[in-house]
Image (cartoon, rainbow, N blue to C red):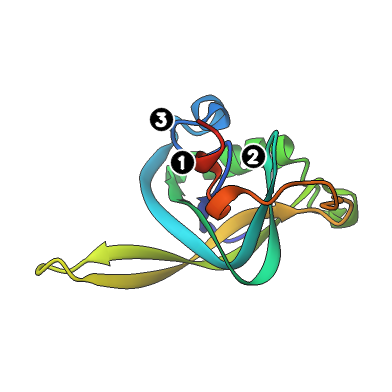
Amino acid sequence: MSREHSLFVYGTLRPGQSNYRRLLADRTVREVPASAKGLALYGSGFPYAVPQRGARVIGDLITIRPGLYQEVLADLDQLEGYHPGRPDHSHYIRTTRSVVVVNRTANGGPWEAFHTAWIYIAGPKINLTNMPRVTDDDWRAVAR
């Protein structure tokens, strides 16, 4: 069994998006804006996060309801075409990454908190050659 990390989402699984409504609505206990450094976002129909030095993907850190964790993760693996035993044949790869949540202190100043989260990144067979870079690496900039 894998560790029960929160989930960093950056595309159609973000609150307000289609797959959030279908697979995550009413199945989470916390959702906060976050970012993942060292990743860039590509795509048009749906996004792919890929490692890229100096980039930063905007998204949300989501905590799944504990009693639903395994069920939700299995649903998400299916949606993303992730095969734990065959990552080379997966559309997306589920991996862990450090993500940043910006909080506010009592006097309004920012402080960053780092969390380890699951994230789905582009699988090995995804060809980014003809895919556009998503504006500001924020899916909401193009998915309005």
Residue beneath label 3, please? 26
Is disc 2 surrounded by few (<14), some (14 to 19) or many (20+) residues within 10 Å? some
Who's the residue at 53% across and 63% down the image? 36
Rendered location of residue 32, percent (x, y): 36, 51
Q: Residue furthest left?
A: 107
Mark 3 or 1 closer to N-term?
Answer: 3
Residue beneath label 1, please? 67
**Label disc, if present, on residue 76 of the rendered structure:** 2
Mark 2 or 3 closer to N-term?
Answer: 3
Residue placed most toward the observer, 98 or 131: 131
Q: Is residue 6 left or right of residue 90?
A: left
**Label disc, if present, on residue 139 of the rendered structure:** none
Rendered location of residue 136, percent (x, y): 54, 54
Is disc 1 surrounded by few (<14), some (14 to 19) or many (20+) residues within 10 Å? few
Residue placed most toward the observer, 10 or 28: 10
Residue 1 appears in the picture as rendered? no
